[in-house]
Amino acid sequence: MTELLIKNVKPYGEGEPVDVLVRGTVIAEIGSGLTAADDAEVIEGNGQILLPGFVDLHTHLREPGREDTETIETGSAAAALGGYTAVFAMANTSPVADSHVITDHVWRRGQEVGLVDVFPVGAVTVGLEGKQLAEMGTMAAGVGQVRMFSDDGHCVYDPLIMRRALEYANSLGVLIAQHAEEPRLTKGAVAHEGPNAARLGLAGWPRAAEESIVARDALLARDAGARVHICHASTAGTVELVKWAKSQGISITAEVTPHHLLLDDSRLETYDAVNKVNPPLREASDAAALRQALADGIIDCVATDHAPHAEQDKCCEFAVARPGMLGLETALSIIVQTMVQPGLLDWRGVAKVMSEKPAAIVGLDDHGRPIAVGEPANLTLVDPDAEWTVRGAELASISNNTPFEDMTFPAEVTATVLRGRVTAREGKAVGI
């Protein structure tokens, strides 16, 4: 049985450094001065922080259909380098992942690559068209065992279709994740509706387009006795609605992206489409509300909404550019800058919002687990004192549409371990 010895690390950044011995796929010992077999792999932690492997509920891997922008292999490499051991691949591929044929392929391909567990997200409706429910039952029962469904990129806008989806999801024990956007309020919209968009001549995307769907779906989930998850929350109003829904006992969870925590619509000044995203970058007050909500537990977790795009889809007129940003390799550093350094979260809090809560939301048994003897060895090693500068061309993704180009961030993932096997180390994915 293979062994891995991680020496001189601080689990959750707490206490004196210890050694962690992994035997096979689980943590076998935690203590000082541990030894391993002669052929064991050894990682010298140098006092760095050890966390549970991160879980991303919202990733776009583009395969099948747009392998020119990302593949399951390159996206998995980016995830491993970002400290992730599990990602959920959204359904807006080509063809759409609205059948078990596609979702089973995504699962199998992720396992072949072997850098992270790639869990397929099934479409709620056929073709993401919002008109007819997809075969949720067959996808849930397939090899991919789909446990989350979303039409992300599109809202399930018909309330009757959404109600039926929630009812079916409840009976299947799966989760509906909603892209909250009332499409009649966002037709032609390209930026947050506010003073900046008005001054720049950009069609506005109002907060109410998101908040009206969040409110509606909270009520639908209440009546269906089902769970609903809000994708990429972006407004202060959404925070208040989620807070209210939770106070009413409604089973609602929500995620926030790193870019909505850090950036705001002042970035639109240059008309650079790298800053175009859906939902759009909001005002600084929204970002502040989201940061506080994440610290308070109103927003449950961080999700990257990693969205690679080809150069021709971004280097064009802002209004016609595709929305989306890379996110997997920069997520941890942005959370450190926006949440840890200001004192909103400690390292246990980071583990909670980037690993434990997302794993719990989708019911993963072997991710987001405590760092303890007998637990699965899905781990991330972080150098909290490191600084690094983002260069899109140096990221693992095929695309390089990062809004963080040339920005310097704190903290760096130095190693990632999936079930006892090192998948990323010293800035390189291991095994591809």
Image: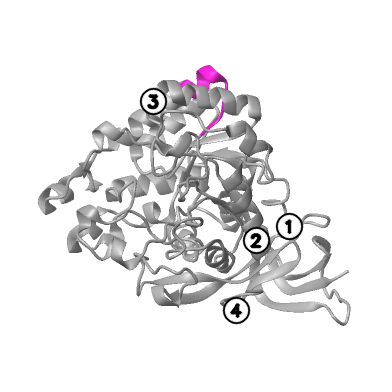
What type is the residue that disc 4 sits on? Glu
Which element type, helix, strand or loop, lies under badge 4? loop
Is the residue 268 above or below the residue 213 in the image? below
- Do the residues under discs 1 and 2 have CB atoms within 8 angstroms? yes
Of tags 3 and 2, which is closer to the observer?
3
- Do the residues under discs 3 and 2 have CB atoms within 8 angstroms? no
Task: Check disc 4: other Cα within 10 Å, few if <14, some if 14-19, many if 20+.
Answer: few
What type is the residue that disc 1 sits on? Ile
Instruction: Quadrant for the C terminus, please.
Output: bottom right
First in sequence, mark 1 or 2: give its number: 2
> In the rendered image, which residue does mark 3 sit on?
158
Magenta-tinted stretch: 220-228
Q: Which mark is residue 371?
A: 1
> In the rendered image, which residue does mark 2 sit on?
51
Q: Residue furthest top?
A: 223
> In the rendered image, which residue does mark 4 sit on?
426
